[in-house]
């Protein structure tokens, strides 16, 4: 049950909101002043969301937002504003508020905004857990992926993780293992691309003594080593046809047959396969079994490339820099804004793995001092130094202004309707209008 704090000096508004929310099974508490709201936040436990009036008898409602941010709480703060304080509400959103609601309050708008806010809090908490386990993200794409992975973690079904090389497929697999029913068992990773074809069966399924020349002792194999846990098969698309057939049989029957053995050995393993290749295309080429693809690919999870989640670049870079400095015995230092800016401009074809290498290189070259742009690889420096295209920026701004103008004209200055038409949040539309010098009042006057 989600918990919501209402901070408003008008008892009637608090009463109406409480009735609406409690009918939707929210747990509700109230405060009439900024000081009381902040004190309730300080006392804990944390709320999932807070509806806070911007104008309160003892000051600005943003003091409640500041309390939430100072304590590092996951509470989503939604400001309530009158028409005359919309600019202040937009400023509050820029300062960390989730959104704002205009008075008079609309029941459906309140419920939709709260639903979105509590969902974001849940995803953020999952992201925090991921950070603690080594998977660092603030990207909405990654948060959606983690939400899906969380649902699948306890299923025990085989999973297929796809994504470009270096994007973090194994990190996600370890995150899933830690939340699965077999988390107390081992996590065994195998790079299928590095397995010699002649030894792949023995490596995965084991062999008995004397099974082939050189087999002087029995070997368990990776499946039996991972018994009771998770087996991660990286680059599963590189396995040869004989091993693919045997892998399918293990998945279907829950037992392995070591090379040279005359009996099956039961095994309880959760298999997570990963690949950067198109297994469907490989199936059409005849190099990957379609039945195996269907068996492991029933629950696909795609890790987006780093260029599609730029929010993660500063977080990852800071972590990699901190780890590199700690290994050298140096004190922690933040990366300079110039370095972070250069990292953000680069496309990262090698994804997270390439970012780690670039940051560690910069730290080692700089020594105990703070790394500068000159310590970055040449291609990263070049991307950071490339001048922005003023013509392109102007064209983009012109197109945005035209689209927003047309939407406001059609909606006769109604910002909420225009935002819905443009698929933007109202707060984001207000920001854009401020940037472009557009006033919705003008559209109401001209269009009557």
Image (tube, grey):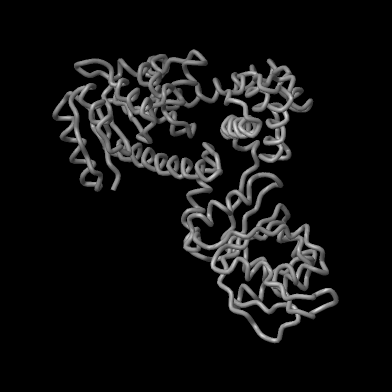
Q: Is residue 218 above or below residue 34?
A: below
Does residue 106 sit above or below 396 in this rendering? Answer: below
- 34 or 374: nearer the eye? 374
Q: Residue at x 24, y 48 (%)?
A: 25
Horizontal arrangement in the rendering, residue 262 relative to residue 91 (left or right): right
Locate the C terminus by quadrant.
top left
Task: Depth check: give the residue in front, 431 or 384.
Answer: 384
Decide if residue 48 is on the left or right side of residue 446. left
Above or below 3: residue 97: above
Quarter-of-image position of residue 40: top left
Question: In the figure, is residue 306 to the left or right of 147?
Answer: right
**Residue at the (46%, 33%) spot, across then down:** 421
Q: Quadrant of residue 242?
A: bottom right
The answer to which image quadrant residue 340 occupies is top right
Q: Position of residue 395 (x, y in %)?
A: 65, 20
Residue 366, position in %: x, y?
71, 22
Residue 233's spot in the image, x, y percent?
67, 60
Give 335 or 159, whichever is nearer the viewer: 335
Q: Name the residue at 66% across, 56% down.
A: 274
Q: Which residue extends farthest bottom?
A: 262
The residue shown at (68%, 15%) is: 390
Q: At which x and y percent is residue 74?
A: 38, 36
Q: How many marks?
A: 0
Which residue is more in the foreground, 44 or 321?
A: 321
């Amino acid at each position: 049950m989600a918990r919501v704090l209402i901070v408003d000096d008008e008892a009637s508004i608090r009463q109406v909101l409480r009735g609406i929310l409690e009918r939707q099974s929210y747990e509700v508490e109230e405060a009439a002043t900024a000081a009381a709201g902040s004190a309730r936040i300080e006392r804990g436990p944390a709320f999932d969301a807070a509806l806070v009036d911007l104008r309160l008898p003892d000051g600005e409602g943003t003091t409640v937002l500041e309390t939430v941010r100072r304590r590092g709480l996951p509470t989503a703060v939604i400001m309530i504003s009158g028409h005359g304080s919309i600019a202040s509400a937009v400023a509050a959103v820029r300062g960390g508020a989730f959104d704002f609601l205009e008075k008079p309050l609309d029941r459906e708008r309140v419920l939709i905004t709260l639903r979105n806010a509590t969902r974001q809090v849940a995803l953020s908490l999952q992201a925090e857990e991921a950070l603690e386990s080594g998977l660092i993200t603030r990207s909405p794409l990654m948060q959606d992926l983690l939400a899906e992975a969380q649902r699948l973690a306890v299923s025990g079904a085989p999973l297929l993780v796809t994504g470009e090389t270096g994007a973090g497929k194994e990190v996600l697999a370890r995150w899933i293992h830690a939340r699965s029913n077999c988390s107390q068992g081992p996590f065994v990773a195998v790079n299928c691309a590095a397995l010699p074809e002649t030894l792949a069966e023995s490596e995965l399924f084991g062999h008995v003594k004397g099974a082939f020349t050189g087999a002087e002792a029995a070997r368990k194999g990776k499946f039996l080593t991972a018994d009771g846990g998770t087996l991660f098969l990286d680059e599963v698309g590189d396995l040869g046809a004989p091993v693919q057939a045997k892998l399918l049989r293990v998945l279907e029957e829950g037992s392995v047959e070591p090379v040279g053995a005359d009996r099956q050995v039961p095994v309880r393993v959760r298999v997570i396969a990963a690949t950067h290749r198109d297994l469907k295309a490989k199936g059409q080429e005849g190099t990957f079994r379609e039945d195996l693809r269907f068996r492991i690919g029933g629950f696909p999870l795609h890790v987006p490339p780093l260029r599609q989640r730029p929010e993660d670049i500063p977080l990852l870079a800071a972590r990699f820099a901190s780890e590199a400095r700690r290994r050298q015995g140096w004190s922690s230092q933040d990366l300079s804004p110039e370095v972070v800016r250069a990292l953000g401009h680069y496309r990262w074809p090698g994804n997270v793995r390439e970012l780690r290498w670039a940051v560690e290189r910069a730290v080692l070259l700089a020594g105990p001092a703070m790394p500068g742009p000159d310590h970055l690889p040449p291609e990263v420096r070049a991307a950071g130094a490339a001048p922005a295209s003023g013509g392109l920026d102007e064209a983009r701004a012109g197109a945005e202004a035209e689209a927003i103008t047309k939407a406001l004209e059609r909606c006769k200055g109604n910002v909420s309707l225009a935002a819905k038409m443009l698929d933007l949040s109202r707060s984001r539309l207000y920001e854009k209008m401020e940037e472009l010098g557009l006033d919705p009042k003008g559209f109401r006057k001209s269009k009557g």
